[in-house]
Amino acid sequence: MEKLKVALISDWYFPKVGGIEYSMHALARTLADHGHEVSIITRSYPDVPEHCIRDGVSVIRIKSKPFPGQHLFLMPNAYKQLYYLLKKGNYEIVNCHGLDSPIGISALLASRKLRIPVVITNHSLVGRTIYRPVYYLLGKLLLRNVDAVIAVSSAVEKDSKIMTSKPIYRIFNGIDSEENIFKVPFLFDTKGKIVIATVARMTKKKGVLNIVNIAPSILKKYRNVIFLMIGDGPLRKKLEKMVEKKGLSRNFCFTGEVPRERVLGYLEQADIFALPSSDEAFGIAILEAISKKVPVVAMNHSGVSDIIKNGVSGYLANNLTEFSSHLQTLIENPALRSYFVQEASKELSNYNWDRICEQTNQMYTKVIYEKNYNNN
């Protein structure tokens, strides 16, 4: 395997917690384990070192403050710093992460100017929004500058094809074992209860409002159900107020933001995993649930459809009524829960980071060769 000097670039990296952050670091760490020289270039945070080595990966943080009045874009000097980092870095390939990352997009443009082979990993779906045509147009303009696109699921691949005719490689995100799992106590006794867990950022896009909306009809039939809401976000306080207003506080537990090892600790105590997002690009939380022997109910026609086979390794719902019905079926049927987990676990090897690293390295090598061939 040819050893490469690689830069992975995005705004979305630790200490911020999310799917892109976890996936980018896991890929970087695995590439480093396989002998590649890997740097992560990202934004700075107060009290976080600008340079460090984490799991064999060099983490470089661009020192800058957000542009006044918002949090997404940094001051212009940040993007100048990024340009010179790439110019001096002698990177053989640049892998940007996230079409919504200003640093990633800036790196994409800089790499093209510097003639460095550049790919972007698309981690998201445009979704059902009135701005959909605008987002696709912006995507088309941005993706003109890449040499290739990595799509993390079939759904994202389909979305990406609308925006570019450049080569698209479907390479899933992955999951690895977590040795440091913290056993976390619940706020109340779960003996004799059915725990339905949801791991998601508390936003409208993640569909977390749907859990609160379907809860009354489920709890009317099954009073022993507890909804465990793991994660934080702008909707969390609203959700807690809705639950209190509906008189369901005894049946809901909101954890707020917790580190991954605690998420896995919670999942080990869950009976069912529920993810009501219709625009899920991939679903790392789905893999985490399966790894902890928790059967899954999710929405169909998203990235989750690559992971779950409906009625065989879990349930995929076409609408909220089906979603609620599937939850009730699993509440009533422990044997079916066990069967789904058994079948879903058979596919976990597809999401091994060593396998993903090999696929990514093959793609990097091909992009570098074709870039150099065309330049000659």
Image: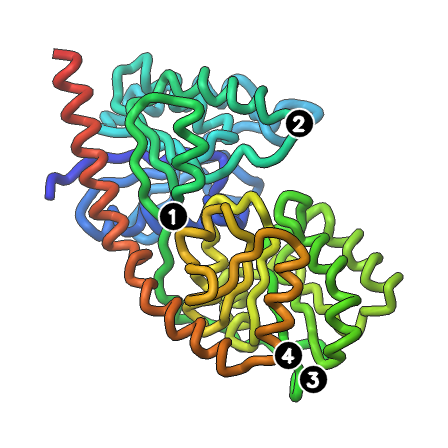
**Mark 2 belongs to which amino acid?**
Ile
Badge 3 density bin: few <14, some 14–19, many ≥20, Cα 10 Å: few
- Residue 264 percent coordinates (x, y): 50, 68
**Mark 4 belongs to which amino acid?**
Ile
Q: Earlier in the sequence, mark 2 or mark 1?
A: 1
Q: Horizontal placement of 317 versus 346: left or right?
A: right
Asked if marks 4 and 1 touch (Cβ < 8 Å), the reply is no
Q: Residue at x 12, y 18 (%)?
A: 373
Residue 194: image tag: 4
**Mark 3 belongs to which amino acid?**
Asp
Q: Earlier in the sequence, mark 4 or mark 1?
A: 1
User: Is residue 271 placed above or below 57 in the rendered structure?
Assistant: below
Check disc 1 and report the residue beneath it: 25
Q: Quadrant of residue 249?
A: bottom right
Badge 4 density bin: few <14, some 14–19, many ≥20, Cα 10 Å: many
Cα separation between marks 4 and 1: 34 Å
- Decide if residue 162 is in sight here: yes
Cα separation between marks 2 and 4: 38 Å
Q: Quick one: SS at disc 4?
A: strand
- Residue 322 percent coordinates (x, y): 63, 59
Check disc 2 and report the residue beneath it: 130
Q: Quick one: SS at disc 2?
A: loop
**Mark 1 belongs to which amino acid?**
His
Asked if marks 2 and 4 touch (Cβ < 8 Å), the reply is no
Check disc 3 and report the residue beneath it: 189
Q: Residue at x 70, y 64 (%)?
A: 254
Asked if marks 3 and 2 touch (Cβ < 8 Å), the reply is no
Cα separation between marks 3 and 1: 36 Å
